[in-house]
Amino acid sequence: MTTVIIAEKPSVANELAKYLGHAQRADGYISVGNYRVTWCFGHLLTLAEPHVYDEKYKKWRADDLPILPQDIKIIAKDDAGIRKQLKIIGGLLKEADDVIHAGDPDREGQLLVDWVLQHHKNRKPVKRLWLAAQDSVSIQKALRNLQSNLQYAPLFQAAQTRSIADWLVGINLSRAFTLAAQKHGYRGVVSIGRVQTPTLALIAMRDHDIETFISKTYYVPMVLVGVEKGSFWATWIVPESLKDRYADGKITDLDFANAILQIPETGVISLLEKKKLQTAPPLPYRLSRLQKDASARFGLTADEVLTICQSLYEDYKLTSYPRTDCDYLPESQHSEARDIFAALTQIYPTLAPFVQQANTSLKSSAWNDKNVTAHHAIIPVRGNGATYAQLKDKEQKVYDLIARAYLAQFFPAYEFEKTDVETTFDQKRFKATGNIPLKEGWKVLYPPHKAKTKTDDSNNADTDDKEPEQALPPIILGETARKLATEARQKQTHPPKAYTDGTLISDMESVHRVVASKTKDIDNKWLKLLKENAGLGTEATRAGILKTLLDRGFIQRSGKNITATTTGRELIKALPKEVKSPIATAMMEQELAAIEKEGLDPDVFLAKQRASIEKLIGIAAAATILLSSPEVKSDIPIKAKRTSKAKLTSTKATSATAKKPRAKAKSTVKTSTEKTCPECQKPMILRARKSDGQKFWGCSGFPNCRCVAQVNA
């Protein structure tokens, strides 16, 4: 009996084969006894480009829109190696008695292997291997818990439907708005995406808020209070009669602030409350929280963190599956802590003292089956021999965060005493607060600057306005208080901070809050939808969305900060709200979830998408899209009168289409084997503008594809 295992990528296939026993390598697969372990290279198949349906779509013409094929074609990618691997898998399936689907444990992993099985019209029984980590123990557990692949059909339907919907949006609206912009002389491609465009809108809106912000001076009345055993600063408490005017305590009238401070020389400690409080350890990481922390602490980009996590998972086998939206862990895995600790001591000796202090009998709130989704939180695993010392610097930093977060689950809560003090001077009340640590608990795992449960990488405009925490002296309720000094402390309001990877991902994840703060009279049901569906994008896609916006020249980096380019801002200003609002994304994610969990018919969903696209094409045709030339310009001359006839689609350049006058430039251009055109997937070429020598990426498919992108630092 022959079983074929199809993994998503060669690295997973290698680990499976290694676990199964003595392996014999062949061309495109590995034989292990009765098993034939083969692999994909990610997606081997893709949705066909428009010109596959009809050659006329090679040219972008308004008259050809909308492009709404009823029978979606899924074809092999145009790559010799991919075609060869597909053929090998097909041959193995013919000889198989049954099949094990070993795609990554997510929507895309389900989709790409199912597409391969459909491509070969497989009729053999298929089991699903749900592999959360690639160490030997995790593989053993997954192989013992194989399920029928039919149980994952709703996951496949949701993934395929999302792919089709995104294809329809991208193909139609990118063409529609590009043609609208080119009527007014724009030279680039206006790429539109269901998640990409609302994300760009967030960035442009933040830039606008910063640039239009007017700083104001305000005053905070404060008094230095003396008691028998010391002193402390206290802040004026706004009385109920003035709450409507000074709810935030910010007084813009200096004379009024000074008048408040006209108080007697002595007062009384009128309130003293002491509470012993606890802070539980932070939960283990989901991807977005890890990206936020790594951005705040180390300045890493979202894409860097995702790449590192993939490497820790696939190459080093040191952590579990990274593209997770879950902070929780299965209760059954609590018993594995001792084994993981033993491995941690060998992998990362620096943590050995903390491992010895950890108490495996403790069970934090992270262990909760009810809160575990398809993938549990990112945690360290036993590994297969790799060590912390072998990791690169950035990999070490990310692994350290993951390991400490897991260890924290086996430490007690941080305990502290919170003291609230009110001092009354002739009916005017002033408040001070102080905390006294009692037990460090899980905070011993973190250096002082990392012990905060919230990072300093904040969106809050007034972060710097908060009074620093002070140590309070011993205080007795009812004792006499002396006025030692007064101050109308001058402060300034601050604009919101420019986005970083961490804060942008935070707002993408919690976009309902942004929408609520910026949109008047919005129906709460949409805010609820945005919140329930985790905002814009997913854990697996957010980093890629930022990279796409960078590659297409719509956003730019300056150190840790992310801002929109001039073209990006103008585009958002010109687009209708139906394209840039996150509400449409919320509605789509709700229906995709219904396909996956409630059996919604994908055809019903796609019919709605087609109707929406037809409406938006009409809006684009009537719109005035005024954009300045792309910030990254091509050195290829384009005559304005021929702009509307430019070939902008994803056709492939051939030697016949290349113009001879450009042949002399071959020695000065560099073709990238890693950077591909976002429009047609051809390699990009590094070029230089004739006007000022500035470098940019241009599609090698010119003149059929005129896509250009910035060269990012």
Image (cartoon, grey):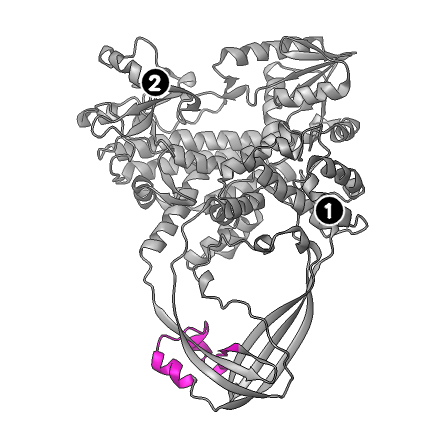
User: In this orientation, which residue lies closer to the viewer: 526 or 404?
Assistant: 404
At 30% from the left and 39% from the top, the residue drawn is 567
Amino acid identity at mark 1:
Pro
Q: Which residue is mark 2?
A: 56
Q: Which mark is residue 392?
A: none
Q: Position of residue 546 (x, y in %)?
A: 45, 38
Are the residues tagged 2 and 1 within 8 Å (C-beta)? no
The magenta region covers 233-260
Taking the image as shown, residue 360 lies to the left or right of residue 161, namely right
Q: Position of residue 249 (x, y in %)?
A: 45, 74
Amino acid identity at mark 2:
Lys
Q: Quadrant of residue 180?
A: top left
| Number of numbered labels in the structure image | 2
Q: Quadrant of residue 90?
A: top right
Q: Which residue is mark 1?
A: 353
In this view, 344 is above or below 425: above
